[in-house]
Image (cartoon, rainbow, N blue to C red):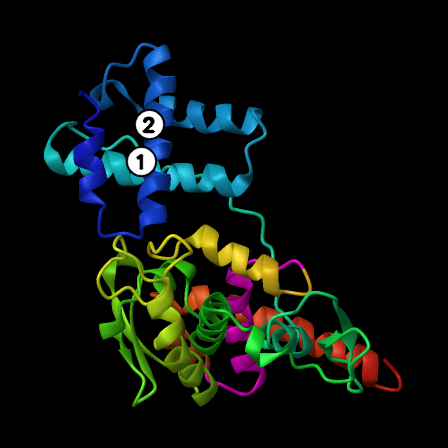
């Protein structure tokens, strides 16, 4: 009770569900460690103890990103304790942690995107390159890359809509899963998204995405809705519940010809826009980034792509 975990969790409820879970878990793990060292609550914690805990995580070979997130969790928690008057001063102020490893996000090629968004593979299909070098699915023994339309299931329609929307709008998986039908204005090609910190933004979607959503919201969705389906949920899983992040990962596992994480579609969306000449601040707005610095990572990705193309095409490269 001294740590007031439930009260703290409620105080950060406006953040994304994944962030709330991560922060609460990080603080609970620290409290368990601190109690073994004699601390009975946040008032018994000082800056030295916090630094020792981060060092303890490093000795246990935790990833730098995990340690950095833990430091952010502890700063959030002790700042909250200070605001409530539980502690006289915040021991986590200016608490630093090693910067996460700088890794450029994976970006799918245009060929990989096309293969991902094609008609689902049917039994016996193989993945082959077309004349332009793009990856396509072709039924064995048949020249056509299209599957049999009569064999499509409601799940196929849902998967089409999910993948088209992730790439068309660069949504985070949590944003996609939380969408309600009232958030869609398909007539205008606009989707209202609730992002991190409960911030709302409007994103644009193209005609192909609109058509995929329109198809899914007809008979296919009705066939998958059950008594437990949340009212208005755009996407549901096989049990009729709102689609979750693991469900989206399974869709990628079924449909992608190469191992792909759902967030790669968001990375690809941003990078392809920049490659096409989009302004960085426009991309920032579409992604829902609070800081332009967050968006600038995609300029590095584009530079790497330019360097690769230059090296492979210039006669003297």
In the displayed structure image, the side of residue 269 where residue 191 appears, left or right? left
Marks 1 and 2 sit apart, C-alpha to C-alpha, by 6 Å
Vertical comparison of 210 with 60: above or below: below
Vertical comparison of 239 with 82: above or below: below
In the displayed structure image, the side of residue 290 where residue 172 appears, left or right? right
Vertical comparison of 39 with 238: above or below: above
Boundaries of the magenta span: 259-279
Q: Crowding near pointer 2: few (<14 within 10 Å), some, many (20+)?
A: some
- The spot of residue 274 in percent (x, y) is 53, 80
Residue at the disc numbered 2: 28
- The spot of residue 58 in percent (x, y) is 54, 29
Residue at the disc numbered 1: 24
Q: Residue at x 45, y 29 (%)?
A: 54
- The spot of residue 302 in percent (x, y) is 61, 75
Q: Are marks 1 and 2 in contact (CB under 8 Å)?
A: yes
- The spot of residue 313 in percent (x, y) is 82, 84
Q: Residue at x 78, y 82 (%)?
A: 130
Most foreground residue, 138 or 30 = 138
Count of numbered badges drawn on the protein: 2
């Amino acid at each position: 009770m001294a740590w007031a975990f439930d009260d703290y969790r409620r105080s950060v409820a406006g953040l994304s569900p994944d962030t709330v879970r991560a922060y609460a878990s990080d603080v609970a793990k620290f409290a368990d460690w601190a109690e073994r060292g004699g601390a009975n609550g946040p008032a018994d914690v000082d800056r030295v103890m916090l630094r020792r805990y981060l060092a303890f995580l490093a000795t246990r070979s935790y990833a730098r990103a995990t340690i950095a997130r833990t430091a952010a969790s502890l700063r959030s928690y002790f700042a909250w304790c200070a605001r409530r008057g539980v502690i006289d001063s915040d021991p986590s102020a200016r608490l630093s942690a090693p910067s996460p490893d700088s890794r450029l996000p994976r970006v799918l090629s245009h060929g990989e995107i096309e293969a991902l968004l094609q008609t689902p593979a049917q039994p016996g299909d193989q993945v082959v390159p077309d004349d332009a070098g793009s990856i396509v699915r072709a039924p064995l023994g048949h020249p056509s890359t299209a599957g049999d339309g009569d064999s499509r299931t409601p799940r196929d329609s849902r998967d089409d809509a999910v993948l088209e929307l992730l790439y068309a709008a660069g949504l985070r998986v949590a944003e996609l899963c939380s969408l309600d039908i009232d958030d869609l204005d398909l007539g205008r090609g606009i989707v209202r998204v609730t992002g991190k910190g409960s911030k709302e933004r409007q994103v644009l979607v193209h005609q192909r995405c609109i058509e995929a959503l329109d198809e899914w919201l007809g008979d296919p969705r009705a066939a998958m809705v059950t008594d437990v389906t949340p009212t208005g949920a755009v996407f549901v899983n096989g049990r009729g519940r709102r689609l979750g992040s693991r469900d989206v990962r399974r869709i990628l596992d079924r449909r992608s010809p190469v191992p792909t994480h759902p967030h790669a579609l968001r990375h690809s969306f941003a990078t392809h826009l920049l490659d096409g000449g989009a302004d960085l601040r426009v991309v920032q707005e579409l992604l829902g980034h609070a800081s332009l610095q967050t968006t600038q990572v995609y300029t590095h990705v584009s530079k790497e792509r330019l360097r690769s193309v230059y090296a492979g095409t210039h006669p003297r490269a």
